[in-house]
Image: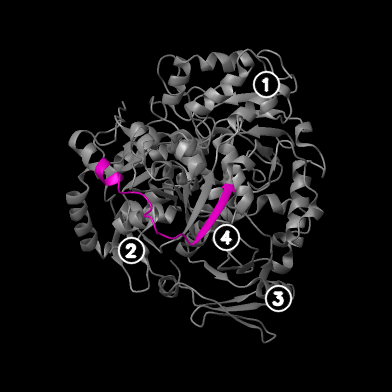
Amino acid sequence: MVKPRTLYEKIWDAHVVERRPDGTCLIYIDRHLVHEVTSPQAFEGLRLAGRKVRRPDLTLAVPDHNLPTTPRRDAAGNRIPISDPQSAQQLAALERNAPEFGVRLIGDADPEQGIVHVVGPEQGFTLPGTTLVCGDSHTSSHGALGALAFGIGTSEVEHVLATQTLLLKQSKTMAVVVDGELAPGVTPKDVALAICGAIGTAGGTGHVMEYRGSVFRDMSIEGRLTVANMSIEAGARSGLFAPDDKTLAYLKGRPMAPAGADWDAAVAYWKTLVTDDGATFDKTVVIDAADIVPTVTWGTSPEDVVPITGVVPDPGSFEDASKQDAVRKSLDYMGLTAGQRMQDVAIEHIFIGSCTNSRIEDLRAAAALLKGRHVASGIKHAMVVPGSGLVKAQAEAEGLDRIFLDAGFEWREPGCSACLGMNPDKVPAGERCASTSNRNFMGRQGPGARTHLVSPAMAAAAAITGRLTDVRELMTTQKGMVA
Amino acid sequence: MDKLTTVEGRAYPFGMKNVDTDIVIPAHWLKTISRSGLGQGAFEVLRKQPGNVFDDPAYAGSPILIAGDNFGCGSSREHAAWALADLGIKVVIAPSFSDIFSGNAFKNGILTVVLPQDAVDRLMEVAKTDPIHVDLEAQSVTTPFQDRFHFEIDPFRKQCLLGGLDEIGLTLGEADVIDSYEARQAQERPWIVPSAAPAVA
């Protein structure tokens, strides 16, 4: 009898090109997403060594990180120059490298352009059972569709371009089990933050996670993308969801997904991609869905979470002396004091976007709350940055852009935007942002910027009241009446 | 890649836990298309604070960095490794590292040494006054005070660091096994090749 295997072990085994005596394996890579920030040095390395891209047909390039989210073409269709010469240079490098090495490029003004982790699933480039890499740690997102997907550094980008393989050691496995039902107002983002809080940012180091339990089975593909996206914030390079009927329904008919007989063959294979009964995980973490509430971060690490109904923690309440010190530094940076109610924290900026929360369901959730309402007077700047041109077009077809604009939000072009301080969208020093992104690190949204990670609905709620707000209060308020 | 055998010198007694790669090198430094010169941006946020170890002349040019748990978490940016290399750091010692960072460090000839917290605490003390010696062949970290700490390292990584080997060149030398994997895959999973190009102009 074949030994029962986890989903991860099945995908791993199917991609071993060669196993070395020390256990290191040469692993085949089926999909490679390339963006402008972590690829220039890799292409340059190939050029210097006279090497070519082994499988350009398995590679897809999309600029996203430092593109401004303002219009990219004027009325005549001419490029509006990017004012930052270094950003322009990186974009130009990708636009030169992709055709030179035969790699497909979705360009900055193409309707399909967007954040790589939104574009991959949307185009059907991301498939169950594939190995997928990108020079970006949030590549874990693609695990939502059952792809073994993980972020790599630029040397590895170069290695994949040249050889379509990576030298890897097999990871340990961690089951993250959430059973039960999520209460109203509790979203996939809250689940992801709860996991970070429960196991810490190093909790998943060395492990590939598999999300199991009824909450994840019931979750939409977009919700799963949010959860898988933040696997890396809990230390795991990858987080997997077993493909199911929702996965198939999502993928069928996507431009780069298999079609016809290929589709049938692929589906037959994908149906084998479940963890076998009797397979064991190296670690198991169990969280009760009933314990998850709308969540915000108070500090400078994604593990620094607290229920929105809670207060800023006291550094002295942490056992470890070095953590106490880290908490003090975080509170100092964040301008918060122990015991302060999270709901009293005033917010100046709202950012709805990023590879975590910029898909159509995210925008719908925020718009549902904002309909007929307006951002509070204390909000200096609120913006929505759709994850891709296709998300933007869909939202516009549904009239969501009008809701955001009427509420006082800006409606931008797709890109990574204010998730990271690489493009013009930044939060000024000392100012506070309710952000649907994934990292509240010091300086992440700009030097000195203070980030509170929240779900799209919670970001909308904060926009309406001007302070961190329990979204459930606005859900029970009559439409149009601002609490 | 430069060979790495032994490293001796002063060490930055840094020790901070959960240092993410945004701290090692902030995003605005990622706009370069070259691998060099990033040392200027290394630990930029921390260097604004008075008394930081990176601007203390006692440690200037130290080849060793002693860090806390979970060093290099967060973003996959290899610029973090490039920034450390540009500072002249050849060895980072910590109780644990993020997976992505330790891979990036290794690919740039930087040795990541995992030691228990008490050993790291001891080295933090020594580093304030004296040099530290790291011997990759012997897999040991020693001090002038007879401290000797053994560390584990993946044999393949050790061999690459000692020999300064080019990993891509090594893998390309095995093109035949990759060819046969692809031939097998084309039989078993022909749907792997994307069926259509995205509809782009």
Which percent across, then down, holds residue A405?
58, 15
Tell me where residue B17 sits by quadrant: bottom right
Regarding mark 2 in the picture, which secondary structure is present there? loop
Q: Which mark is residue A3?
A: 2
Mark 3 and mark 1: Cα distance apart in space: 57 Å
Which comes before the other along the chain, label 3 or label 4?
Answer: 4
Q: Is residue A48 visible?
A: no
Which percent across, then down, holds residue B64?
61, 69
Regarding mark 4 in the picture, which secondary structure is present there? helix
Which comes before the other along the chain, label 2 or label 1?
Answer: 2
Q: Residue B122 carries which label?
A: 3
Q: State the extent of the magenta-drawn residues as a range.
A: A267-287
Regarding mark 1 in the picture, which secondary structure is present there? helix
Residue under circle 1? Answer: A476
The C terminus of chain B, quarter of image: top left
Amino acid tagged 2 = Lys
Same chain under badges 3 and 2? The reply is no
Same chain under badges 2 and 1? The reply is yes
Amino acid tagged 4 = Leu
Residue A261 falls left or right of residue B81: left
Residue at mark 1: chain:
A
The N terminus of chain B, quarter of image: bottom left
